[in-house]
Image (spheres, rainbow, N blue to C red):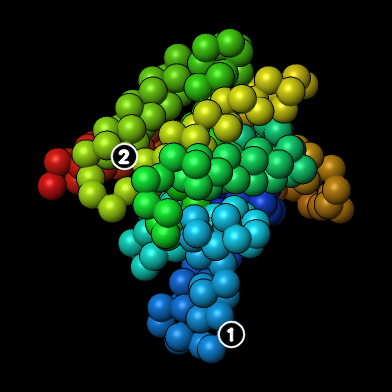
Amino acid sequence: MFVRTESFQEFIKFYPIVSGLIVIHLVLWLFIDIFQLSFAMQILREGIGNNYLVGQGEYWRLVTPIFLHGGFAHALFNSFSLVLFGPALEQMLGKTKFILMYLTAGIAGNLGTYFMAPDAFYQHLGASGSIFGIFGVYLFMVLYRKSLMGYANTQIIMVMLVLGLFMTFSRSGINIWAHLFGLIGGFAIAPPLLTKARPFSVWQNRSKFANREPKDIGFNPNRWNKRSNVTLKKYGKYLLWGVIIFLVLLAFM
């Protein structure tokens, strides 16, 4: 579920919303931080979350900070989180519901920041509220829809959630309210979104797209060879836990 066995082309084809969000993160980072293009700097000025300006009626600032980031590390970390945890949820919810969940959680995080941040001029940006919204949906599955997740995946989600909350409260410069209210927003909207959800299956993606493509008449001798996929899945689990351990160590640095 959280081990990526798709090729690059398959990833883009199977998960267009997650892929598009990652492109937006990185392109905006390039235009703002590297090229410093005038229109991109204008997007930053007009899009960054600002509690005072929201109070003055600039309500779009509850949405636009979701797509902006404060530097490469910030954009990379959130994009990497999307790569790991977004695809399964995009398949389970479908494109429209995934977008609705992502925006709802992000807006919930920004609303929480507006109402709870002690500084009336507090500024913020980043997709962290939406990322925590993804964890909020998974948390709902763990508690109320266990059939949608296996035991190993439940362990991974709970470890990452605990780690995420630990980093939220232990590191400086973190928008605590965006994380907490994003988590609550994802959890709150999960029940109606998961009504017809089915467990994640990468083979479901492949079979769906295979039916849309013309079938080859010729015989492919590697068609039934699953060894490479089994190997990738086997070692992918170790890679994922290696990433988790790295993040744990990073949290203590």
Q: Considering only vertical position in the picture, is 77 above or below 116? A: below
Label 1 element class: helix
Residue drawn 33% across the image and 62% down it: 73
Tell which of 98 and 150 is nearer to you.
98
Residue drawn 51% across the image and 73% down it: 44
Residue 177 in picture, x, y percent from top left? 42, 40
**Residue 168 — which label?**
2
- The three-letter code of the residue at mark 1 reads Phe
Residue 14 in picture, x, y percent from top left? 68, 47
Tell me if 1 is positioned left or right of 239 in this view: right
Query: Where on the picture, by quarter, is residue 23?
Result: bottom right
Q: Residues within 10 Å of mark 2 (few under 14, many from 20)?
A: some
Q: Considering only vertical position in the picture, is 70 above or below 15? A: below
Query: Which residue, as the protein is rendered here, is positioned at the far left?
Result: 253
Label 2 element class: helix
Q: Which residue is mark 1?
A: 39
Q: CA distance from mark 1 to mark 2?
A: 32 Å
